[in-house]
Image (cartoon, helix red, strand yellow):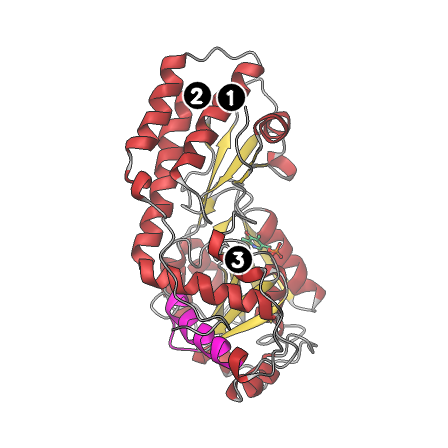
């Protein structure tokens, strides 16, 4: 089968055609009025996606650099930190915090489950000197969604404790208004819901967190946000700006906001719903108890190896989805719903998954395959993510 290549991982994701175009434009210098205009617009618009009145900062790093930045700008060695660990990314953040000298207590949540905010309240009542709670909004290794709003309410009762959230597969994928949810530090990454290549992280801090900038003593240089605050006040970034990525981000923000955040979330939700409702007909089973819309993790049918399935889907049908990591390796597939995904690509994915299962000896009727593909074709995805026209001048300025 000759499908065009489709990247349906939970990041990196397919790029919008308009983004690919802007990435191919000639380089401009980052200390130019032209670039300053773009940066200013991007920084202002990011606040809308983050749902905050605070500044959002851009960092040239992958998402993990943003996670590091959230820690080192507000914590000191020796600080007590509670890390909610429900998968790979939770583990990484806990490890990072102890690397920088925090006394980390990991609150372990079984893979596929979501944290119970009341247990966090109990912990904080017993450990009132805790300086920060760390949590993924969506733990991408399991596809589980965590109750960020409820956690925010709990943690806000503790005046010494900050709530730091890894929103790398959340911000831009579903509603997570930072201020309203009482989140004190939020990080996003370019290659997930922002539909860009890898290489940018975005961070924002509440007023409660900003008060720590001056007293936090974790070592930091590149990620010292105080440098960036000064530079942004001059309309610049402190280090050389990744001009191409920021220009591309400008394009993405333009169409996200033209489309409307709620319709973007609704579309991602619809892709997730179709996947969660229809793929079980092929024998897959939704893995997390409380699934996020950003991706769907599915247990593969009994007796099959997830790694082999995903490899086959890629080499024979030209579609990339991810498998599981660590304890979920071989057991699950992870299908991303973020990025530029056409209805046709969803149809191809479902047909190719069915064909893959057949290639592995599972009996699946033509009628079932047609039924699945038709359900997508008949869904409102068909009218879905059409590129919103973007009007830009030759030099990148908005007209
Ligand atoms: C992808 C991801 C990260 C890591 O981002 P990198 O860009 O690979 O550094 C961290 N947390 C979550 C929840 C993610 O999905």
User: Quick one: SS at disc 3?
Assistant: helix
Please provide the residue range marked out in magenta. 36-54
Question: Residue 269: horizontal and vertical position, in percent?
Answer: 35, 45
Q: Residue at point 71% right, 64% down?
A: 99
Q: CA distance from mark 2 to mark 3?
A: 38 Å
Quadrant of image for the N terminus:
top right
Residue placed under numbered mark 3 in the picture = 21
Quadrant of image for the C terminus:
bottom left
Label 2, residues with CA under 10 Å away: few <14, some 14-19, many ≥20: some
Q: Is residue 130 visible?
A: no
Q: Does the Cβ of the disc 2 residue fall within 8 Å of ligand 1?
A: no
| Numbered disc in front, either 2 or 3 | 3
| Numbered disc in front, either 1 or 2 | 2
> Is 135 placed above or below 326 here?
below
Left or right of residue 228: residue 257: left
Q: Which numbered dot is residue 301?
A: 1
Q: CA distance from mark 1 to mark 2?
A: 8 Å
Q: CA distance from mark 1 to mark 3?
A: 40 Å
Question: Residue 177: horizontal and vertical position, in percent?
Answer: 36, 64
> Is 75 placed above or below 368 here?
below
Of 39 and 294, the residue lying toward us: 39
Q: Does the Cβ of the disc 1 residue fall within 8 Å of ligand 1?
A: no
Do the residues under discs 1 and 2 have CB atoms within 8 angstroms? yes
Residue placed under numbered mark 2 in the picture = 282
Residue 49's image quarter? Answer: bottom left
């Amino acid at each position: 089968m000759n499908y065009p290549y489709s990247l349906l991982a939970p990041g990196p994701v397919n790029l919008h055609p308009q983004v690919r175009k802007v990435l191919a434009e000639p380089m401009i210098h980052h200390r130019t009025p032209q670039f300053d205009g773009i940066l200013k617009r991007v920084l202002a618009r990011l606040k809308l996606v983050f749902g905050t009145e605070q500044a959002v900062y851009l960092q040239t790093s992958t998402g993990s650099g943003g996670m590091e930045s959230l820690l080192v700008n507000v914590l000191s060695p020796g600080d007590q930190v509670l890390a909610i660990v429900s998968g790979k990314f939770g583990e990484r953040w806990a490890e990072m915090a102890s690397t920088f000298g925090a006394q980390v207590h990991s609150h372990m949540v079984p893979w596929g489950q979501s944290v119970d905010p009341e247990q966090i309240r109990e912990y904080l009542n017993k450990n009132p000197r805790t300086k920060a709670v760390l949590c993924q909004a969506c733990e991408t290794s399991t596809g589980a969604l965590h109750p960020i709003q409820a956690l925010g309410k709990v943690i806000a009762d503790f005046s010494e404790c900050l709530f730091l959230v890894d929103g790398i597969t959340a911000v831009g994928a579903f509603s997570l208004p930072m201020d309203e949810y009482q989140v004190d530090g939020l990080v996003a990454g370019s290659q997930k819901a922002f539909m860009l290549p890898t290489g940018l992280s975005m961070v924002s801090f509440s007023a409660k967190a900003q008060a720590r900038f001056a007293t936090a003593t974790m070592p930091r240089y590149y990620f010292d946000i105080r440098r960036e605050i000064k530079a942004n006040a001059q309309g610049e970034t402190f280090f050389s700006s990744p001009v191409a990525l920021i220009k591309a981000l400008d394009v993405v923000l333009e169409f996200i906001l033209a489309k409307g955040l709620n319709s973007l979330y609704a579309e991602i939700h619809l892709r997730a719903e179709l996947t969660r409702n229809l793929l079980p007909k092929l024998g897959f089973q939704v893995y997390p108890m409380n699934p996020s819309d950003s991706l769907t993790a599915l247990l593969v049918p009994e007796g099959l190896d997830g790694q082999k399935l995903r490899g086959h889907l890629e080499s024979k049908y030209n579609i990339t989805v991810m498998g599981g990591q660590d304890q979920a390796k071989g057991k699950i597939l992870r299908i991303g719903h973020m990025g530029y995904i056409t209805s046709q690509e969803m149809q191809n994915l479902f047909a190719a998954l069915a064909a893959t299962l057949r290639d592995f000896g599972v009996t699946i009727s033509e009628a079932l395959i047609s039924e699945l593909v038709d359900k997508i074709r008949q869904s409102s995805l068909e009218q879905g993510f059409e590129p919103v026209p973007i009007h830009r001048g030759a030099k990148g300025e908005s007209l």
